[in-house]
Image: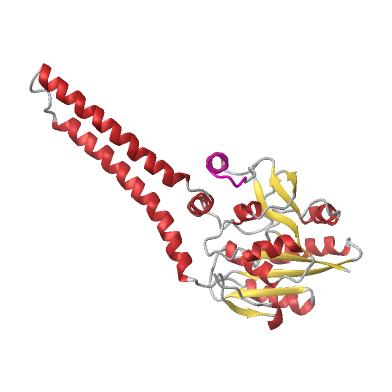
Amino acid sequence: MEKISVIVPCFNEEEAVPIFYREIIKVAEGMDGVEFEFIFVNDGSKDKTEEVLRGLSEMDKRVKYISFSRNFGKEGAMYAGMDNASGDYVVIMDVDLQDPPSLIPEMYDIVKSGEYDCAATRRVNRKGEAKIRSLFAHAFYKLINHISQTEIVDGARDFRLMSRRMVDSILDMCEYNRFSKGIFSWVGFETKWIGYENINRSAGETKWSFWKLFKYSIDGIVGFSTAPLALSSLMGIILFFVSIVGIIFIIIRQLIYGGSAYGWPSMICVILLVGGLQLLSIGILGQYLSKTYLETKKRPLYIVKNTNIAKQDKNKKEV
């Protein structure tokens, strides 16, 4: 009997967990001949999420939970889930039911056929989402696909079903600064995309503020493209040639008209322009340097406080 591991990151989701459990159980009961395990990763929640998960695990032995010592972020939670999954296939999905569990049977059939190693989902629209947020999201996908060789599909979700060999390849990429949408694409393997309309949360509030999404997008750009470094170098070259042309122009005007080299306002504007571009370039370099610094620390991706998963199945990997 084949086994599917369903990984569900949770952060302050005590209201959503029971609703999600009822829905995923319906799907599991409808798939004959397939064994399930549900791995809930409690990412340092401050509410009663862990208590709810412990109660479910006592009622249903298929329910596993991993509680972190603090909040390590969704990337660490997804990695921990994959690291502890024992299934032949692995599903990653959100607990808020914005990822419809009803798609799992279709995704399973696609990957089981052997033609694909991954069945992934993407939103075909962003109905119900703030327009400014949707605008920046589309702009991010256009930008990163333009400057990176790793293709990231617009509207791609973390919700996907993967074969064991694809999951093992992802686990081999134990980098500390993770951008899973890029990692899923970078490892390769054939992927079948399934589109669906945006769905509102079943309960609770989103934990992704605009600022968090912005920082996450920066991680994606820095992690999968060196184009910003090339851009800062290009700006330096352009400014160098502009300054040469400007010097020649000022000398010629001085020789023809005399006294034309004066004008502190224009000088201040030039200094501010050049200084701003220099700070921008230093900032870009600093982003890459900071990521390198964090990688060299070799800190663990997550630290487990409590779990009901057997020790032999929870080999925590370090970067």
Between residues 162 and 18, which one lies in front from this camera angle?
162
Instruction: Please state the horizontal and vertical placement of residue 269, each as a whole percent of the image.
Output: 23, 34
Kindly indicate the quadrant of the structure image that contains residue 267.
top left
Instruction: Please state the horizontal and vertical placement of residue 184, each as a whole percent of the image.
Output: 65, 55
Between residues 24 and 73, which one lies in front from this camera angle?
73
Residue found farthest to the bottom: 311
Instruction: Please state the horizontal and vertical placement of residue 289, each as a whole percent of the image.
Output: 41, 58
Question: Could you tell whether 69 is left or right of 229 in the image?
Answer: right
Residue found farthest to the left: 259
Instruction: Please state the horizontal and vertical placement of residue 254, each as a whole percent of the image.
Output: 11, 22
Q: Is residue 60 above or below residue 4?
A: below
Between residues 15 and 93, which one lies in front from this camera angle?
93
**Which stretch did the figure color magenta?**
141-151
Numbered-mark total: 0
Kindly indicate the quadrant of the structure image that contains residue 48.
bottom right
Residue found farthest to the right: 32
Q: Which of the colour schemes (rainbow, by chain, secondary structure, one colour) is used?
A: secondary structure
Task: Tell me the residue at 55%/76% (across/down).
Answer: 69
Kindly indicate the quadrant of the structure image that contains residue 160.
bottom right
Q: Is residue 279 above or below residue 88?
A: above
Question: Could you tell whether 162 is left or right of 106 in the image?
Answer: left
Quadrant location, the N terminus: bottom right
- Can residue 91 be seen at all in this image of the molecule? no
Task: Tell me the residue at 48%/48% (across/down).
Answer: 226
Residue 135 magenta: no
- Can residue 155 be seen at all in this image of the molecule? yes
By secondary structure, the bulk of the magenta-drawn segment is best described as helix
Q: Is residue 219 above or below residue 231?
A: below
